[in-house]
Image: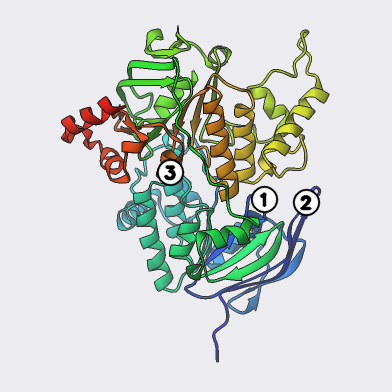
Amino acid sequence: MNSPSRLQLTDITKRYPAVVANDHVSLRVEPGQTHAVLGENGAGKSTLMKIIYGSVKPDGGHVLWNGQPVQVRNPQEARALGIAMVFQHFSLFDTLTVAENVWLGLDKHLSLAEVTRRIEAKASEYGLEIDPARPVHTLSVGQMQRVEIIRALLTDPKLLILDEPTSVLTPQAVERLFVVLKKLASEGCSILYISHKLHEIRELCTACTVLRGGKVTGECDPREESNASLSRMMIGAEPPVLEHRAHTPGEVVLRVQGLELARETPFGTDLHGIDLDVRAGEVVGIAGVSGNGQRELLYALSGEDTRARAEMVQVAGQAAGRLGPSRRRALGLHFVPEERLGRGAVPTLGLAHNLMLTRREAVGPSGWIRMKALERQAAGLIERFNVRAGGPHAAARSLSGGNLQKFIVGREIDARPRLLVISQPTWGVDVGAAAQIRGEILALRDAGCAVLMVSEELEELFEVSDRLHVIAKGRLSPAVARDRASVELIGEWMSGLWDADPERAAREAERV
């Protein structure tokens, strides 16, 4: 007699006022199976996962757990069954420590000291190093991802749901995570895996269900597919190939000279002697493992940290180190942060009103907001960047992560900045949208904009950048031209090893 499936969904349906997120979705996951759920942004993947986890109530359909009908009414009931989930948008309290955040979701009989010990043991076992005593607000996005993964692993799940788990992890961290997931699967744990990285799905998963427009449109064994065939199943076409044409850069738009900044928290990173130039008509990329000073550098460039001496940060020839974000914006600097909700957008505000964070075209001479103009502007961005949302007044938090990312990136690109500083530009977006965003960045460069891009996606950096730096332990490597860089070289420099062979580093810098 065959053993029952670990999880079986039948005709799951979820309707919202503006969209049917899940339309009679059926899905079966076997014990020890790593099952991918594939689809473009807004296809209904995250909604389906939240239904399984009990944080969203379905309007129809049935759920079987180990062959028995269940109604998972909340995440507590899901965890009691053995279901754990790592969300794409983290569910962490900024003011609490790592250990305190993890403690909230565990057995209340455990002491904080015991939870701390278990975090340290699990982090060491799986190569996901994290300090349990650090407040969450001091962590990079990549480090927050580790906290979420460790919290899920500490529940010893029978079904682990991972929604874009590698979107802000380095290639080395992804490799370590895959070792963890393969071990869990071999021990009988089932895994539901959402990712837009097709090569990951082909390497890790043994089954795949494809969603499009909230409906199941296909099932396959991804190990027998190519990236191109998976892309066709997901978006109906292969993503366009980017053309990175040679381009002669112009004048320096951003100049950072000898930037020294002490960390603002005990868990931050000091910046040491950062020197950086970005010229009009070029994309400069910065690679690095999260937590090595990217956050501090971006704050200093955006104007959120104004402690640097004025001349240390120059925008369009003007000393800007002491200027706040609005005054830097007046010089032509626009900024896309890595945190979508909270920094890139106000969660409860509609998309039209979120435009007002950085765009003022719809404000009349007397200071009144011209709502019709604001709505038209938001609607234009929604159409241009194919943002799936319930119109210009849809709340930012109602969008999928990838669709909100497209809107925020589109908002800043559409402003036609003189200097664009962008962090993790394609975090959590599907392959088609990622290609569009990267193409828009290159078009912006070709129009004469200076672009500084911080990313943990090496493939993205090599595809878009003209020159590359690496940041490690608060120090910036020499620049290396894109056509002279290699994954091996960048990987070495990500460990801060450019000083180990200073002659080679100097040669690469001279060639730029």
Residue 39 visible? The answer is: no
**Mark 3 belongs to which amino acid?**
Glu
Numbered label attached to residue 42: 1
- Is disc 3 placed on a helix, strand or loop? loop
What's the distance in space between the residues labelled 2 and 3, CA to CA?
32 Å
Query: Where residue 152 sits: x, y (%)?
Result: 47, 57
Say which label, 2 or 3, has the lower sequence index: 2
At label 1, the amino acid type is Gly
What is the spatial separation of the Cα atoms under label 2 and label 1, in whole angstroms?
10 Å
Using residue 166 as the reference point, say whether residue 402 is left or right of it. right
**In the rendered image of this protein, does residue 110 appear above or below residue 428?**
below
Q: In terms of secondary structure, where does tag 2 sit?
A: strand
| Position of residue 277 measured from the top left corner of the image (x, y, whole percent) | 38, 20
Q: Is residue 299 visible?
A: yes
Q: Which residue is mark 2?
A: 19
Contact flag, marks 2 and 3 (Cβ < 8 Å): no
Residue found 37% across the figure and 44% down from its top: 132
Is disc 1 surrounded by few (<14), some (14 to 19) or many (20+) residues within 10 Å?
Answer: many
Hey, which quadrant is residue 267 in on the image? top left
In the picture of the structure, the residue carrying the numbered disc 3 is 457
Q: Which of the two labelled residues, at mark 2 and mark 1, occupies the earlier sequence position?
A: 2
Q: Position of residue 156 (x, y in %)?
A: 44, 64
Residue at position x 51%, y 67% in the image: 225
Question: Hey, what amino acid is under mark 2?
Answer: Val
Image marks 3 and 1: residues in contact by CB distance under 8 Å: no
* Cβ atoms under marks 2 and 1 closer than 8 Å: yes
